[in-house]
Each structure stands twice: as structure tokens, then as C-alpha cells.
Amino acid sequence: MKKILIFAPTAPTSGITQYILNILNTAALDGLEIDILSFKNDRLKKWAEEKGRKYYEFNISMYKHPIKYRRFLNEVFSSGYNVVHYHLSSLSTLNIFKIARKSGVKKIILHSHSTFTDLPSKMRTVVFSTIHKLLRKRATGFADVLCACSKPAAEWMFGSHKAQEAFILNNAVDTDKFAYNKDVGCDIKAQLGIKEKYVIGHIGRFSKQKNQHFLIEIMEEVLKLRDDCALVLVGDGADREYVQEFSKEKRLDNKIWFVDFKEDIYKYYSSFDLFVLSSLFEGLPITLVEAQANGLHSLVSDNITKESNLTGLVEFLPLEEGSAFWAQKLCKALDSSKRIETKMLLKEKGFDLAEQSEKLLRLYRG
């Protein structure tokens, strides 16, 4: 029996959390004992409790309580793990690798999920991006396996040279679950009271990175061109209240629907007529794969890797062109786009969840 520790310091509604749960709920975990180390993450905690596995909550600051921090990690790693799988967006310390190696962990997997550092202030972003770049060469020295969700994410985490060695583990989805269902979509529209509207949809954690503020500006411009649209924003996060207040300032709160994150999030894609993603940076967003699995035309920022266009349904737009430009493109897409069947396309591109899950489990078992 191999003991695996998944280290995922990420929010419950993040794409990283969803990726991990997709794998864990699909893969045959025979011969593996998987525990989880995370920040306060009720979704990962729930999985661990339901499976009778350990869930360690990481709530000690390395900077404020360095001794407690090391003592906690030493205790976690003393459980005798064969493999530790780090799911990270950036690097801020090497201690998590040093302590694991010192405790006898034989295989360290370093997995990159982003292409930038997402922090509230510009100063902190600059500081932590600099720390990340200084640490990545030494971090790759600790890792036995390098993984990433895309080539740009590999280059961000490992540097251009080491990125060539990385396994690309695609952010695959259950294509059957996310397939378009007209009846489900109509039900969701009816529940929201927008059955007769074209629905512009977005799913994502409310954060600086996801740039939902810009979506409100786009909607303001759309309504100057037509009045048959509604914007539905699904998700939770630190910036949600700010975005809601901004929509009220624009007097758009009766045109925009905010929906809490739900476990049956896949149903909402079927209620959308168009998917939008205005991110400032991304690795390869799992929500965009989900939207394509639903056959949705998607308008996304050109900061997102072009590798994410798996089906021909993704249109990349520059944020610098502004909200009026995006609104014109969006209205044109609403009038011309049609859903297509994408299951085989995604499978051919390597985004079949069962295949990707098995690929990761081979790394665990090898």
C-alpha cells in the first residue's frame, strides 16, 4: 500500500480544487492511501472524511510562527508518505520540500497550475513574483517529477529550460457530465427568472486574476446595444462583494445575477448562451475546458494560453481594446454561435478525464 500526500494550499472553489476532486472521484485508487494537506478547504476536507482519510488543515504562518510552522510540517510528514504531490501556483518557500525530503519521502511531484502570482496589491505581487523566480531553480532540484497544466505554466514554475522535462497533465473533465442538456438549461433559466433572455455566463473564483470587474463594464456596453441579455456570474471569493457593489454603482444589479458556487455547477453551463473569461493571467483554466465540453462558444482574454482552444469554439480578445469592443464581439457571437458536439474532439486532444487520471496514478505507483 503506497501512502500519498496531496498538498494543495488553495481555495475551495478554485480550479485546482476542482482538478483534484475530478481526479480523486474518477480514478481507481486501489493500493493507494491518499491524505490531504490544505488551507481551510471544506470540499477537500469532505472528500477525505468520506473516504476515511486524514485531512490536515494548514493555518500557521511561516513568517509569524516559524517554529510552529516547522513543527506542524514535521508532524505531518512523519506519517511516512511515499509520494508528496504539490499543487502550486507559485513558490514562496523551500521548507515544504526540505522537510518532506528529510522525513524520507521518496518521490516529490511539483505541479504547476498557473502562469503568474495573484495577490491583492501590486507591491506584494512584485515581491512574491521575484521570490518565486529566485526559488524555482532550487525547487526543481528537490522535485523528482515536474508536472504542469500547460506549457506556459511549466515555464512559469520551472523556467524555460526545465520546462522541457515537465509532464503535461491536462485539466481534463467528465465530458458526459458537462455535455449540453437543453432541459436542464431551461430549468436553470426559469429558476433565475431569465427564461426569455440570452445568458452571458461566467464561472470562477472572484479575484483580481479573474477580472470580473471588467465583465460588469462589458455588460454596461452590451445593454447599450441590446436589452435581451442577462449576465450570470457563478462563484465565491474575496472580490465578490466588491464586484456586486460595482454593479450597483452602474445600476446594473437587475441585469446581473450572482450565484453561489455549487457542487452541481456543471448544470449552469447548459443555461448559458455564451461563456466569457476576462482573466489577467491563467495556466489552462478548467472552466474553459468545461465550457467547451458543453459546446459553448467562449470569448476569453488573450492572456489565456492559445493551447486552451481545443475545439475551435474559443475566441481570444485583447483586454486593452476595452469593454465597448468586447461588447460588440459578444453581441455578434450571440447572434451567430451554435453549440456543437465536442466529446470526441476533447478525447483526441487528451482531455478525457479517465485517461488523465490513469496517467497521474501511474506517477504515484511508479
Image (spheres, helix red, strand yellow):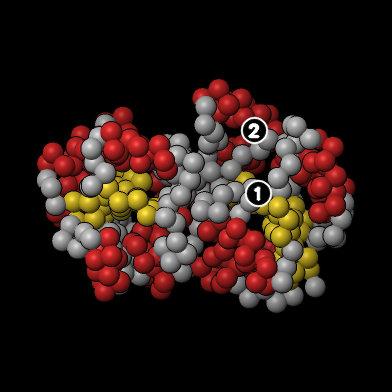
Q: Amino acid at mark 1?
A: Phe
Q: Is residue 326 left or right of residue 301?
A: left
Classed neighbour count for the residue bearing mark 1: other residues with Cα under 10 Å, few (<14), some (14–19), many (≥20): some
- Residue 257 is marked as none
Q: Residue 188: where, in percent of width, then height?
A: 29, 66
Given residues 294 and 306, the one toward you in this image is 294
Q: Residue 271: where, in percent of width, then height?
A: 28, 63
Looking at the rendered image, the disc whose residue lies closer to the viewer, 2 or 1, is 1
According to the picture, the residue beneath numbered tag 2 turns out to be: 132
Q: Residue 310: where, in percent of width, then height?
A: 38, 57
Q: Earlier in the sequence, mark 2 or mark 1?
A: 1
Q: Residue furthest top?
A: 123
Classed neighbour count for the residue bearing mark 2: other residues with Cα under 10 Å, few (<14), some (14–19), many (≥20): many
Q: Is residue 322 visible?
A: yes
CA–CA distance between discs 2 and 1?
Answer: 20 Å
Q: Residue 78: where, in percent of width, then height?
A: 87, 55
Q: Residue at x 35, y 50 (%)?
A: 258
Q: Residue at x 64, y 61 (%)?
A: 45
- Quadrant hosting residue 56: bottom right
According to the picture, the residue beneath numbered tag 1 turns out to be: 39
